[in-house]
Amino acid sequence: MSSRSKILALVWISVSLGASNYAATLTGTVKDPSGVPFEGAFVQAQNSKTKITFMALSDKQGHYRVEKLPAGEYTVQIKATGYRSDPQKSGTLQADQNAAFDFALQKSPVRWNEISIYQAKKLWPESKAKDTIFDKCFVCHGFQTRMASVRRDEDGWKDRVAYMRDAMHFSLSWRFTDQDAADVASYLNSLYGQESVLPKSPEEMPNYKDTLRPFRSEAMNIA
């Protein structure tokens, strides 16, 4: 390596280390409605200017730690299925500043856009269109934001399915027929249309509890 390259490498390392050393940290605890530490809540800190979101999970003691945040203003909120908590604004965090926010969760009905694809497969009514969605649509995206978070009439679902076919024509043109499109649009309308066949919350379905899985500590490694 040339002397010039060595100098540039050292400068890059110094800048990187400096950025890590002079970054803000958010900490705190998450507790359930009875005051017990809550494990497995997603804590999301979103930079108000850049909209970049940093995440961490609360541990067995309910503690969370979001590190290496660039200076700026952040909105901190909790995502936990079946619970809610008011978001908090950090004000402006300076470099190398530590701030703490504690959250007390309140029970809230589980929403359809909070459940997993595994749970949807168990809870959605059986249909050929359902099989088509799981085989051909979920290759690229889930249902939580694109389907379960909106309400459309049947024409609206037809439009969205047509858009998907057009956008993904290179992979769907030969395996997603006009009949598939009509069936999928009709099925989605029955789920998330103006007159849904689903109850307001998946908790109201008799087999919902069978779809629940306990939180495992290994999940702490993903955030």
Image (cartoon, rainbow, N blue to C red):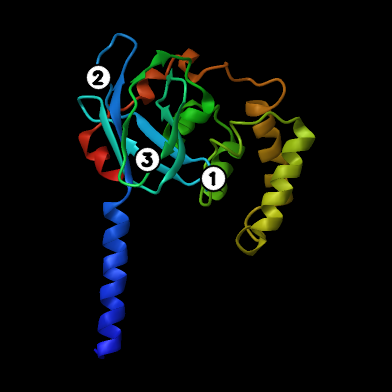
Other residues around mark 3 within 10 Å, as few (<14) / some (14–19) / many (≥20)? some
Tell us which disc is closer to us: 1 or 3: 1
What residue is shown with label 1?
A: 49
Is disc 3 placed on a helix, strand or loop? Answer: strand
Mark with earlier residue (2, 1): 2
Tell us which disc is closer to us: 2 or 1: 1
Residue 219, by quadrant, is top left
Q: Position of residue 117 (x, y in %)?
A: 46, 36
Mark with earlier residue (3, 2): 2
- Label 3 and label 2: CA atoms lie apart by 18 Å
Is disc 2 placed on a helix, strand or loop? Answer: loop
Other residues around mark 2 within 10 Å, as few (<14) / some (14–19) / many (≥20)? some
Q: Position of residue 159 (x, y in %)?
A: 76, 43
What residue is shown with label 3?
A: 55
Mark with earlier residue (1, 3): 1
Amino acid identity at mark 2: Pro
Q: Give the numbered dot on residue 92.
A: none
Q: Nearer the viewer, residue 142 or 210?
A: 142
Question: Viewed as shown, does residue 198 lie left or right of 29?
Answer: right
Residue farthest to the top? 34
Q: Position of residue 203 (x, y in %)?
A: 46, 16
Residue farthest to the right? 155
- Label 2 and label 1: CA atoms lie apart by 32 Å
Q: Quadrant of the C terminus?
A: top left
Amino acid identity at mark 1: Lys
Q: Give the numbered dot on residue 37.
A: 2
